[in-house]
Image: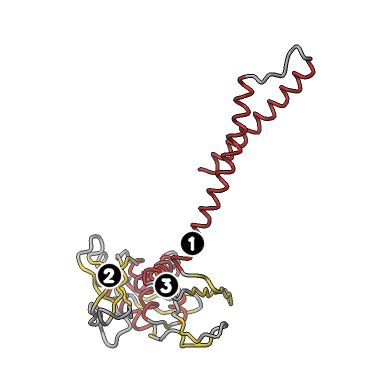
Amino acid sequence: MTEAVLGRAFTVGAQAGRALARRHRVRSSLGATDGLTTTSSEKIAIAAIIAGGVAVLGGAIAYGIAARRRTATLRDTLGRVQTRVSKGGMTLTHHYDPEMPIQQRVGILQDLVWKGVTNPQMRELALAITGYGTRDVTVGKRRFRVKGAGCPARDGLCESEAVYNWTKNNIRYTGDVAPVKMPGGDVEGVDLFQAPHRTVEFGGEDCDGHTVVTTTLLSLNGIPAKFRITAPTKSSDWAHIFGLAGLPKTNPKRWVPLDTTLPGNMFGREAPSAKHMDFVA
């Protein structure tokens, strides 16, 4: 809206300037008796030209400032982008920030959940997991024969448990990338975040990948979902993440843990921790 107004102000000023020039040429041909004294309408036209120029200059400065702020906001949210590598229709983006706080890491995961809920293949998978009968579902290059849990309509507890069971049975828990030598010479591990359809396709991920999958599948079944991040002691860094299902789904009164990375059947339970934070998925 601002750019449109500024463009219009510049155009109006230019038109007034051309009209004023024509008026002066006509006056000159009429001789000295007509005079070249600037009239009130001409003063207004000159003012319009100046105002248009000032508006355009101010708009350019404001646009530049806004662009820098948007760039800074993106960097602050996701960390500095070091490299992007595209292979086989997939893109790996390397974000690097040695001081990236947990809120920014969560921002990356929230963005991945959004990519999941807008993926039709994930929607089909989510409904197959909780629905009736058996169907073949393809996600990326991986094909599944999914036997639905047969959950009654609006039964969020049944749907949540079905999501938990399917994820635990089909997505293997595996660690992040082990420490490797970086191009700059540093030896560091890589905290790898995957879009949920990639984790389903690849068949493995660590706790953040499992969490992105479960919260995506919950959301696609109409169940509000959250991330829970935990630490083993009050003074330690954040070390673990898992999903929470809000029940009942239309007006949650409790949040049921879905930690698919722990041994055994842990549906509805969580490992002990000294502190935690919750975020909307």
Which color scheme did the rendering employ for the protein?
secondary structure
Q: x%, y% of residue 39?
A: 64, 19
- At label 3, the amino acid type is Met
Q: Which of pointers 2 and 3 indicates the residue nearer the eye?
A: 3
Q: Name the residue under label 1.
A: 72
Give the residue at x 45% y 68%. Answer: 78
Q: Mark 3 points at which residue?
A: 100
Mark 1 neighbour class, 10 Å CA radius: few under 14, some 14 to 19, many 20 or more: few
Q: Is mark 2 on a helix, strand or loop?
A: strand
- At label 1, the amino acid type is Ala
Q: How far apart are marks 2 and 3 (CA)?
A: 27 Å
Q: Mark 2 points at which residue?
A: 245
Q: x%, y% of residue 133?
A: 34, 74
Instruction: Please say if 177 is above or below 39.
Output: below
- At label 2, the amino acid type is Ala
The residue closer to the viewer here, 128 or 235, is 235
Q: Is residue 201 visible?
A: yes
